[in-house]
Image: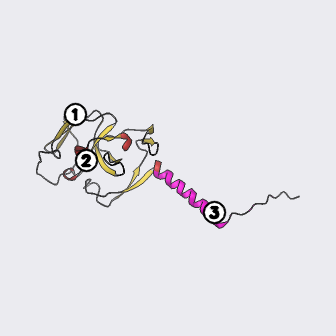
Amino acid sequence: MSNKISQNPKSTFREYAEAIIIALVLALFIRTFIVQAFKIPSGSMLPTLLIGDHLLVNKFIYGVKIPLSGKILIPLKNPKPNDIVVFKYPQDPKLDYIKRVIGVGGDIIQGRDKTIFVNGKPFDDKYGFHIDNTVIKGVRDNFGPITIPPDNVFVMGDNRDNSYDSRFWGFVDHKAI
């Protein structure tokens, strides 16, 4: 009797299949919980982000989320003003939008003649950019005052004159970020 245990070598096909399955599981885990790639499709964030720029987004900076539900399992921190966030567009969750946080839950936001006010004080708008000196009396340049609900943010593109953002469609829930 021999002490050697006989082992059947794996076929080449099985080795490749196992390697591919492990790679796919790791890729899905990384994309779901750690980092995801995005491409900038429009000029709403000019001059900060250019059309065609590629970004890698840290997916757990605001907390670990349960996939598909958006529920935050382990909250780490909340978005704050001047953060750039990627979120599910509130009117069509299949679309991802990239904008800058202007205000958070409880803040009162107002726009007057291209100047943004948060809680009655001018917003430190170091990234906002205007290409058009004309002040339009509509929502683009004059809006509010509006109070941001809890667990929501008010976002705007850096290209203030050419951005479809919270001024037009409302707030972003933390679950969508």
Q: Is residue 30 magenta?
A: yes
In the image, residue 42 lies in the stretch drawn in magenta: no
Separation (CA) of disc 3 from disc 2 = 49 Å
**Residue carrying label 3:** 15
Task: Give the SS element for disc 3.
Answer: helix
Q: Earlier in the sequence, mark 3 or mark 2?
A: 3
Question: What range of the chain is rendered magenta?
Answer: 4-31
The secondary element bearing badge 1 is classed as: loop
Amino acid on which disc 1 is placed: Asn
Is residue 170 or residue 124 the one in the foreground? 170
Q: Is residue 125 visible?
A: no
Q: Residues within 10 Å of mark 2 (few under 14, many from 20)?
A: many
Q: Which residue is mark 2?
A: 165
Query: Which amino acid lies under the numbered mark 2 shown in the image of this protein?
Result: Asp
Residue underneath mark 1: 119
> Callout 3, which amino acid?
Glu
Which of label 1 and label 2 is nearer to you?
2
Q: In this image, 52 relative to 116: left or right?
A: right
Neighbourhood count class around disc 3 (C-alpha, 10 Å): few under 14, some 14–19, many 20 upward: few
Name the chief secondary structure element in magenta: helix
Q: Earlier in the sequence, mark 1 or mark 3?
A: 3
